[in-house]
Image (cartoon, grey):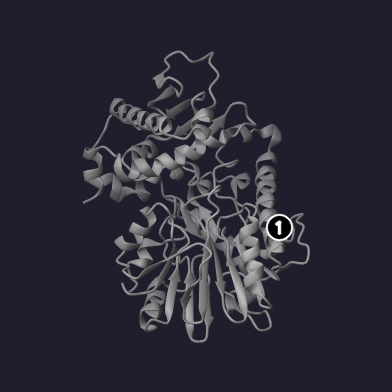
Amino acid sequence: MNHTSLILEYEDHFLLLDPWPSESLAFESWKPHPPCFLNEDILAAFINASNGNAGIVISHGHDDHCDDSFLKKVNSNTNVFYPNYKTKGSLRRLYNNGLENVIEVDELEFASFGPFSIAVFIIEEYSEDDAVFVIKTDDYILIHANDNSVPFPKTLVDFIILESGSRRIYFASQTGIANGYPYCYPQFFKEDDKNTLQDIAVAKTARTIQVAIDNANSVRAHNFISYAAYTISLPLLEKANERASQLFPSPQNLNKLKLRWGNLNLLDFVPGDTLEILDDKVKRPFWLKKHGLDGIANELRFSRSRNLVPVRERFAREFSRLPAVNSGELLGYLRQYLNGFVKHVSNLDAFWKDEIVNKKLIFKVMDVGELCIDFNTGFYLTNYSNIHVNKKIIVEKDVAFLLIAGVFNFESLYIGHHALFERFPRDKYNHELMHQLQVYGYTYQKRMVPEELSKKICV
């Protein structure tokens, strides 16, 4: 269909995986690219008319896997399969969309839906709110790996091999990168190394894909499906910089990378195509027969670039609900935001806390001012020109306002490319700090937005 969305048809039953058929933004910046070739109303009507023979799988709560606009159009009694995560925030999101028949799937235990058997595995040391799905029929197993581009644990590998028997194994996994590095780091924009940015991005993407390929080989998969990067970032597009263009994950482009495929077959199977399982034949619609997916995607990219609108216009509805704040008030709200993060860090386990408390961060709002915070003391530094700062975040005023108002969260800045970042030294990522800023972003957005701002955006 698009991005990570496949629809499986077997014995008059259908499973729709991670639907994103609308043009809704993910991370306040991404659009499906190419968009779903089926209108979201037609797809919802199909699900609703299927008399219980069409179900939906949602792997996790990110917008590009869990499309609120679409889910609100689906009948409330539709079977929806969702991992039994420890935290229930995303589960509540499904209920808030009117879905009443959500089946929580336990780890490595199959739930049944017609001829489909559905199991999940959560690689908790990587993420507690994303899961690998194992979907089994009498003829094949599909591994719906989503964003889990980390080595599969032996427990999961053994489970898949045991359950596969003589079935063919199809492995679908992320073939793109979903964060701001290196695109949002001006340190890599220098003219004297103009190819560095693209080289870093391609090398990083190739490493991600190789992990997925190795996982596929470890479970003895036969075929690999490239997905989970059929998107376009509007902030990157706004840069009008070829070096900021994302690698388009078509099989044609993947074949240009130096990857070790082993015995695995990369299917020439892209959004819009139909794959017949019995003989692995791909049926292609007319627009792909004529121009190919890369040609269609390039034309769409040109069209999108011609019709870009600034952030304030894209989020005009949100701005119309928010009170006006001056520069001083905005920095005051930002200080409250960072104070909340300091408290969040103080409650972390030692593994995370010990790596963050010795860090210093600058948060700069362009044309407004900046704050420099020392996480060891929680104090704001006024004279820090000669002090080693680990990370710098740079945002426009409108973006900062949307962040403290809870319209954006930190992932909108990093994964959504709405901010610029610098790091010191240049080769030090500060993984723990960045990860916890993303975790805290959701906590703040859900329950810490100042009342005078949250009331305005919840009408």
For badge 1, the amino acid type reads: Asp
Is label 1 in a helix, a strand or a loop? helix
Q: Residue at left 50%, top 32%?
A: 350
Q: Is residue 3 visible?
A: no
Q: Residue at left 71%, top 71%?
A: 222
Q: Is residue 441 left or right of residue 232?
A: left
> Residue 301: x, y in percent?
55, 58
> Residue 54: x, y in percent?
43, 79
Q: Residue at left 59%, top 71%?
A: 142
Viewer-closest of 288 and 110: 110
Viewer-closest of 49 and 104: 104
Viewer-closest of 344 and 280: 344
In which image quadrant can residue 400 be found?
Answer: top left
Q: Is residue 134 left or right of residue 342?
A: right
Viewer-closest of 277 and 314: 277
Q: Which residue is mark 1?
A: 214
Q: Is residue 199 visible?
A: yes
Q: Residues within 10 Å of mark 1 (few under 14, many from 20)?
A: some
184 over 373 or under it: above or below: below
Q: How many dots with numbers?
A: 1
> Residue 17: x, y in percent?
49, 69
> Residue 55: x, y in percent?
43, 75
